[in-house]
Image (tube, rainbow, N blue to C red):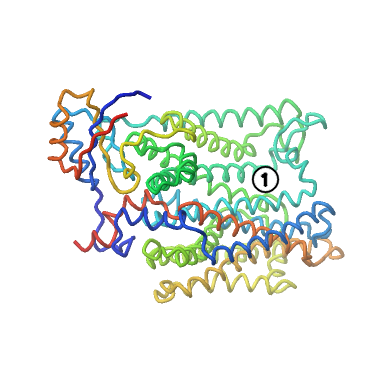
Amino acid sequence: MQVTSSIREPLITGGKTVRDVSEDISRQVEGKPTQLWWIAMGISLTLLGFGFYCLCTLLWEGVGVWGLNKTVGWAWDITNFVWWVGIGHAGTLISAILLLFRQKWRMSINRAAEAMTIFAVICAATFPFAHMGRLWLGFYWVFPLPNTWGSLWANFNSPLLWDVFAISTYFSVSLVFWYMGLIPDFAVIRDRAVRQGHQLRANIYNFLSFGWDGAARTWSRYESVALILAGLSTPLVLSVHTIVSMDFATSVVPGWHATIFPPYFVAGAIFSGFAMVLTLLIITRKVFKLEDYITIYHIELMNIVIIITGSIVGIAYITEFFIAWYGQVPAEQYAFFNRMQGPYWWAYWSMMTCNVISPQLFWFKKIRTNIVATFVLSIIVNIGMWFERFVIIVTSIHRDYVPSSWSMFHPTIYDMGEYIFTFGLFFSAFLLFAKFFPVINMAEVKSIIKSSSEVKQKH
Amino acid sequence: MESNKNFVVGIFDDEDILLHAVEHTREKGLKIHEVYSPFPVHGLDDALGYKRSRLPIAAFMFGLTGTSLALLMQIWMLGYDWPMIIGGKNHASLPPFIPVTFEMTVLLAAFGMVGTFFIASDMKPYKWPRQFDLRSTDDKHVMAVDLAANKMSKEEISALLKAQGASEVNEKNF
């Protein structure tokens, strides 16, 4: 029997029973897609189509269609890559780290957040592949495969190769973790379909649920799998952005060569990830009428995570500047001076405003419990985090060691098209998920109905 | 699958009543075939006398395999098969090999353990489980008692389950 203090806020409101949980969450899987869903899907597929055209042009013509030049060899592609990978981090944090800390409020949001992780990592992976130009040869370049150019293996000393292993492991382990969570919920939909007489749906969802039976022995094993997966995912998620930051930190470029990068990147990743979770869930709870499951209290807790990680990111920005001054290396000092006052000052100050100043508004309880304010700020944070990566990447390299090669980066329609492609991909995938998969983890929510819902606490 | 098996099936509405019922009926000598729940009930595996799962051991062994394979792969490829001087470093130096080793450890541990879970629980996509009551994935806890494994009669078991708080008691034959 679980006991929860009665002074804690209820996690599930509206007097929901265990039965209501199955009913409320399965309803949208069983019904026909709404008009709103079709409109959203139409927009996403349009974006995807336009982006696909840009991507195909890139593959046909070569990477030259992007705005990259001799000085700025990395720009939107890697900015977008780091941005998407970072967004993914919140999903794993919610599902794994909060599980280890026994935070029950994760239960209504972990499914959607993990789905977001998986789609965000897929979006991120498209950028390095596109940047390879000849991506059909890519597998030989990134994986240690025997090839016909001699026994020349991939270079395991390179952080870019570590990234390949980190991102692919992260994607596959997150996928397994997410799918394990879905298995008992697929069985719920299967058994409902049997009772409603939909044999085809029952067969499909039984297939997806691997023939789940819900026996005590299976649950016992299942719980230990979930715990170990959470224990594995926790260092994994921290390692992923650490390794992404090493793409920069192990170089000798002023502005990149900093030991502060791993923790600073991880905090930034969680910061942007929570912002994206909020953006998605505020829409999802409204569209699917899940206000009793994803309550204002959940939103408030996520906003508190945003204040904490946003402040860590702010401290990291200030520390970088202090160290640049204190380190007395002219190249390093110039790199930071150039960030603030150089031709990209607007990107730097957008980053500072969006990431450091705007989340401080969440100190006010009125703002962090207000849905409209949270929605707007969550988008501002994501804009800010995009600028953070742009500032780190482009402003550090656009004025390199030889002033005659100083340059600016101008994105072309194909740079933007690739970014749009990932938005189309992300939202199409999320909409498909929201329609065909249960968006809330029913089994976990059912297990806290007695201890943490409104009904229990009235007694 | 065994055929012609007769079961008495007790339906429970509440996990705490179920937990007490499992404890009390086992004390009275009832052999429970299995309990099916819509969500994990904490303490149920202890009440049923199940041993702790050995899956963590499997995960550890798979992880260890990942660690060794990754180290062997990197040391062999860069140290012996095609040694190259990269940035003036040793051919096979340990620190740069750690990230890939860590990722491979996690990858093999996770996939190995989940694979073991599916095999141990005999779960596969095309298999339909034996279902005692369809409501066991919705909101009811279902206790199945195999008649052949118990000395008590059908009526005695029914009465016992009712007395322990079962909201209904049914029969199910396979």
Q: Residue at x 24, y 42 (%)?
A: B11
Looking at the rendered structure, the kind of residue marked 1 is Pro
> Quick one: A156 or A367, which is closer to the camera?
A367
For mark 1, does the 10 Å Cα neighbourhood hold few (<14), some (14 to 19), or many (20 or more) residues? Answer: many
> Quick one: A38 or A431, which is closer to the camera?
A38
Mark 1 residue element: helix
- Residue B67 in the figure: left or right of residue A94: right
Q: Residue furthest right?
A: A404
Residue A134 percent location from the top left of the image: 80, 46
Q: Residue at x 48, y 72 (%)?
A: A360
Figure check: A61 above or below A202: below
- Residue A158 in the figure: left or right of residue B99: right
Residue A347 percent location from the top left of the image: 67, 71
Residue A296 percent location from the top left of the image: 39, 68
* Quarter containing the C terminus of chain A: bottom left
Q: Residue at x 58, y 56 (%)?
A: A86
- Residue A454 in the figure: left or right of residue B25: right
Figure check: B174 above or below A123: above
Residue A316 percent location from the top left of the image: 56, 62
Where is residue A110, by image quadrant?
Answer: bottom left
Q: Look at mark 1 in the image and give the residue it sits on.
A: A159
Where is residue B34, by image quadrant?
Answer: top left
> Quick one: A57 or A206, which is closer to the camera?
A206
Label 1 is found on which chain of the structure? A
Figure check: A334 above or below B172: below
Figure disc tally: 1
Q: Residue at x 68, y 57 (%)?
A: A256
> Quick one: A132 or A288, which is closer to the camera?
A288
